[in-house]
Image (tube, rainbow, N blue to C red):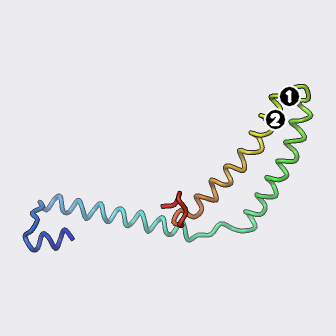
Amino acid sequence: MLSFAESSSELSVAPPIQSRMYQELSGGMRAFADLCVIADVPFPLPYAQVLIVLQLLLAIVALMYVTTALQGCYVLAPLISFSVLQVPWWLSELATEMENPLGTDCNDI
């Protein structure tokens, strides 16, 4: 659009500024193309399924360990077991959200 305005003499822009504008547009399009390449590579389904099974195993083992290790602590045991169990799930959900950055969700680009 700036080229059309420049050619019709409606807008006067110095050539170094116009050149820099095209460099920035080119850099943005290159970054978008790189993002599309990353987004097109799917996450392997067997690996995702193994991660879910391992998270469930961690939940069972960690819950048993925390309850036996902190038998007398009625306040600390639930807090530690909650944090130990929730952090891997939060990281998994974060990774799932970052897996598809170009979707239609409210957190997508």
Q: Could you say which disc has been placed on residue 99 in the image?
A: none
Closer to the camera in the image, 7 or 23: 7
Q: In the figure, is residue 25 to the left or right of 97?
A: left
Q: Residue at x 82, y 53 (%)?
A: 56
Q: Answer with the quarter of the image where residue 79 lies.
A: top right
Check the image and report above or below for 66 versus 51. Answer: above
Q: In the figure, is residue 100 to the left or right of 109?
A: right
Check the image and report above or below for 51 versus 82. Answer: below
Residue 62 coordinates in the image, percent (x, y): 84, 42
Q: Quadrant of the N terminus?
A: bottom left
Closer to the camera in the image, 32 or 70: 70
Bin the neighbour count of mark 1 within 10 Å (Cα to Cα): few under 14, some 14-19, many 20 and up.
few
Residue 65 coordinates in the image, percent (x, y): 89, 38
- Amino acid of disc 1: Tyr
Q: In the figure, is residue 46 to the left or right of 13?
A: right
- Which residue is the site of mark 2? 78
Check the image and report above or below for 44 versus 83. Answer: below
Residue 72 coordinates in the image, percent (x, y): 90, 25
- Which residue is the site of mark 1? 74
Secondary structure beneath label 1: loop
Q: In the figure, is residue 108 to the left or right of 51?
A: left
